[in-house]
Amino acid sequence: YDGWWSDPENSRMFNSNFFVSLLANGWMPKRSVDGNQDKNQWINSNSNFDMWTDGKQMMLNTDICLAYSAGDMEYVDMKAQTFNCCAWSMPSTLGDAIYELNDGKFCGVTDSWTVQTWNSLPQTHTVRERMLSWNKWSEEHNRDAHSMFREMRSACCQNASEYMWNESHKRDCGAVSFNTGRAAGWVERFVQDEDVWLENFYAAWRTVMHLGSKGKLVFLHD
């Protein structure tokens, strides 16, 4: 495989940016890595993504499936080798983590007013809910919520156009206003509270380190 799970800055740090990166960027399939048909991955599809400054950012199928699903309401495995779609979710799934843990960036967009406006769009769980709530939002804010949605999609998925049906009918990987991946709830909790991730990381690490070593581990001496 080819790449890292975070940007160059966060790749040097022990933090929960892996989960932030999952939700704060768009992802598109990259097949036959280095010519190997058995190696397929997901790469950053943000419209302004620059590999030379942002580094090679990638996710494996087992990473993407934590947050995303190919199904709108139910879980369907995400496989880079077979799916032609862009995996992304609305900034409202990140909440304040956009500002606290990602420098106010969403899919590479850094304009704070734009990101804040996008983040104010309400989350919905069905197409009907989206139509009703977004129409109401449009009236209250004197802006077209549906046009803003297309702006977000373009920012997250512009580089994934070859994996989508056509320009008029974009193909998203499942729902985008809420996440239906295998561990979507935990991903959002880890994104919104790094302490929760640290507590669970410690518990998992302790369990793994103790496997097969009951009664054999000792504390290091000074």
Image: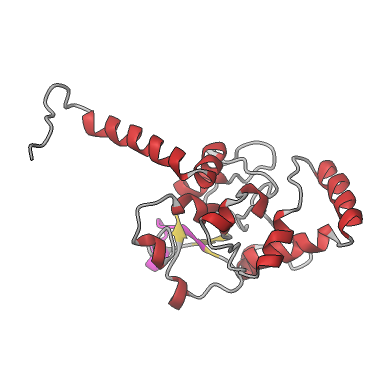
Determine whether 173 is above or below 107 in the image: above
Which residue is located at x 23 percent, y 28 percent? 211
Residue sitting farthest toward the left = 221
Which residue is located at x 45 percent, y 60 percent? 58
> Which contiguous range is marked in magenta?
33-43
Which residue is located at x 37 percent, y 61 percent? 11
Q: Is residue 98 left or right of residue 72?
A: left
Image quadrant in which the N terminus is located? bottom left
Residue sitting farthest toward the front = 222
Residue sitting farthest toward the right = 139
Q: Is residue 64 left or right of residue 35?
A: right
Tell whether position 103 is magenta. Answer: no
Residue 172 position, x and y percent, is: 67, 55
Determine whether 65 is above or below 25 in the image: above
Which residue is located at x 13 percent, y 29 percent? 217
Residue 45 position, x and y percent, is: 57, 66
Where is residue 3, by image quadrant?
Answer: bottom left
Q: Is residue 56 visible?
A: yes
